[in-house]
């Protein structure tokens, strides 16, 4: 009977029913997750920079500590209301993953604190060539010629944008370099550990966030001015914005869960590029980041390289 129904549908020329948003096959929950993910990812970067620039709070590691305390509490609330299921994992197995995330997040936030939003986003794009280089050096993974071609505009654009960034500094560049290396190393060496644990993003955060919060607190005296933090005046607007930053950080993790694995590779890539562009744009509009035509040209060329890289990788995966 199913075959007959199929023939009837074909013969009548009926179009398949769409049950998604705006006549698409995209489920409403996934569409909301995408919108929320874009808003929270862009929002937390802009809010963190706003707190530093407008309120004068420069203790980014302490702010990261607040983020992970909020995430630790938030994941436990989400577990209690049934948003995700509990999965047991030993502290010994979780510790390396938490350590990798600690280094990546800590130095990325220091990168943001000492650089413009545009430079911060451009430095994150550097993770692509560094990942490929590390894969070749460690595992001997040969990069296809088509992929190598996409790295030309990416690296060229990064160079132009960096040279013509009016806020670029030696300490900022050093933090950006360490942040990229830590992020790539974390993704490279902990990805297999994450897979072996069999945890989704929320289950993993449930276990790692308390450990990362403790790590951030231990790093505070090293990277933050503790005396200045102690003397800092916590006015109502500061508390409000720090709380908003913490909730946005939690929102990033929740929406990642709603988006990861539930969208096509193309949709996920487009969303990623959109977040990069919007973050840079809001950095200029909201934070009045000083820029120039050469800096913007470099960012544009780098983004062209990223889009080309993503599309080449997508087509290679489809061809397997």
Image (cartoon, helix red, strand yellow):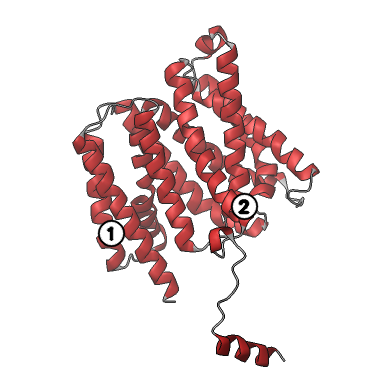
Q: Which residue is mark 1?
A: 150
Judge from the rendering whether residue 40 lies leftward or rightward of residue 92; answer left or right. left
Query: Is residue 158 visible to us here?
Result: no
Q: Nearer the viewer, residue 269 or 1?
A: 1
| Mark 1: few/some/many CA within 10 Å (<14, 14-19, 20+) | many
Residue in the image at 36% along x and 46% along y: 125
Classify 10 Å Cα crowding around label 2: few (below 14), some (14-19), many (20 and above). Answer: some
Is 128 placed left or right of 150 in the picture? right
Across and down, in percent, residue 63 comes to 55, 25
Name the residue located 65 percent from the left edge and 36 percent from the top edge.
Answer: 71
Q: Which residue is mark 2?
A: 258
Residue 102 or 243: which is nearer the viewer? 243
The disc, 2 or 1, on the residue closer to the chain's N-terminal end is 1
Q: CA distance from mark 2 to mark 1?
A: 30 Å
Q: Quadrant of the N terminus?
A: bottom right
Furthest residue toward front: 12
Rendered location of residue 162, percent (x, y): 25, 37
- Does residue 201 sit above or below 62 in this rendering? below
User: Comparing marks 2 and 1, which lies closer to the viewer?
Assistant: 2
> Which quadrant of the rendered structure holds the C terminus?
bottom left
| Residue 15 numbered tag | none
At mark 1, the secondary structure is: helix
- Coordinates of residue 29 in the picture (x, y in percent): 63, 54
Residue 315 placement: quadrant: bottom left
Q: Are marks 2 and 1 in contact (CB under 8 Å)?
A: no
Q: Residue at x 36, y 57 (%)?
A: 132
Q: Position of residue 300 (x, y in %)?
A: 27, 46
């Amino acid at each position: 009977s199913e075959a007959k129904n199929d023939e009837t549908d074909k013969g009548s020329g009926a179009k398949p029913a769409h049950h998604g948003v705006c006549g698409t096959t995209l489920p409403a929950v996934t569409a909301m997750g995408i919108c929320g993910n874009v808003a929270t990812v862009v929002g937390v970067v802009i809010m963190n920079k706003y707190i530093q620039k407008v309120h004068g709070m420069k203790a980014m590691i302490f702010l990261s500590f607040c983020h992970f305390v909020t995430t630790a509490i938030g994941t436990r609330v989400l577990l209690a209301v049934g948003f995700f299921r509990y999965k047991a994992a030993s502290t010994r197995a979780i510790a390396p993953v938490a350590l990798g995330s600690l280094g990546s997040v800590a130095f990325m936030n220091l990168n943001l604190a000492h650089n413009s939003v545009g430079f911060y986003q451009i430095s994150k794009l550097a993770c692509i060539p560094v990942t490929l280089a590390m894969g070749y050096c460690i595992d001997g993974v040969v990069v296809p010629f088509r992929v190598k071609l996409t790295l030309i505009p990416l690296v060229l654009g990064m160079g132009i944008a960096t040279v013509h960034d009016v806020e670029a500094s030696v300490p900022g560049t050093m933090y950006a370099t360490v942040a990229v290396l830590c992020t790539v190393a974390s993704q490279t060496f902990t990805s297999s550990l994450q897979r072996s644990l069999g945890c989704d993003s929320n289950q993993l955060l449930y276990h790692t966030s308390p450990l990362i919060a403790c790590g951030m607190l231990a790093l505070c005296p090293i990277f933050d001015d503790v005396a200045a933090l102690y003397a800092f005046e916590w006015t109502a607007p500061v508390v409000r914005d720090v709380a908003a930053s913490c909730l946005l950080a939690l929102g990033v993790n929740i929406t990642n869960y709603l988006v990861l694995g539930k969208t096509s590779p193309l949709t996920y890539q487009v969303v990623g590029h959109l977040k990069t562009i919007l973050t840079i744009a809001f950095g200029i509009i909201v934070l009045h980041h000083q820029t120039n035509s050469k800096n913007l040209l470099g960012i544009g060329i780098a983004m062209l390289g990223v889009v080309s890289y993503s599309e080449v990788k997508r087509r290679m995966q489809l061809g397997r």
